Amino acid sequence: MASKFPHVKVIGVDLAPAILNEYAIPDNCGFELGDVNLGLPRFYDQIDLIHMRSISSGVSPRCRLHTRQEHLVN
């Protein structure tokens, strides 16, 4: 996503550090450790778009329900 959209800042969040080739990472891309099940308050009111892939087994049903409810309220 960072390569395709060089005008935006992309932040990857994962439970464990990824093994990456640091020379292949665009300047507008960064990575952080975090658990979406615990919430990510550091990012509140700072994100315009969230893209998720291959996380269904890592997100608790309670977290999925909470996220859906917040979306409906907002």
Image (cartoon, helix red, strand yellow):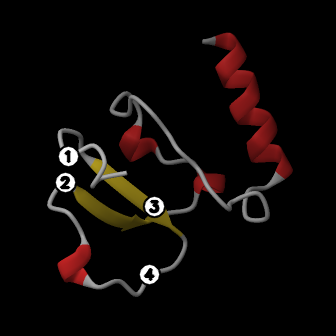
**Residue 72 coordinates in the image, percent (x, y):** 71, 15
Query: For numbered disc 4, what is the local secondary structure?
Result: loop
Q: Residues within 10 Å of mark 4 (few under 14, many from 20)?
A: few
Q: Is residue 71 left or right of residue 23?
A: right
Give the mark nearest the N terminus, 3 or 4.
3
C-alpha gap between disc 1 and disc 3: 19 Å
Residue type at tag 1: Pro
**Residue 63 coordinates in the image, percent (x, y):** 74, 45
Give the mark nearest the N terminus, 1 or 3.
1
Q: Residues within 10 Å of mark 3 (few under 14, many from 20)?
A: some
Give the mark nearest the N terminus, 2 or 4.
4
| Tag 2 residue | 28
Residue, x 14% and y 61% (percent of image)?
27
Query: For numbered disc 3, what is the local secondary structure?
Result: strand
**Mark 1 or 4: the one toward you:** 1
Residue type at tag 4: Ala
Residue, x 23% and y 40% (percent of image)?
8
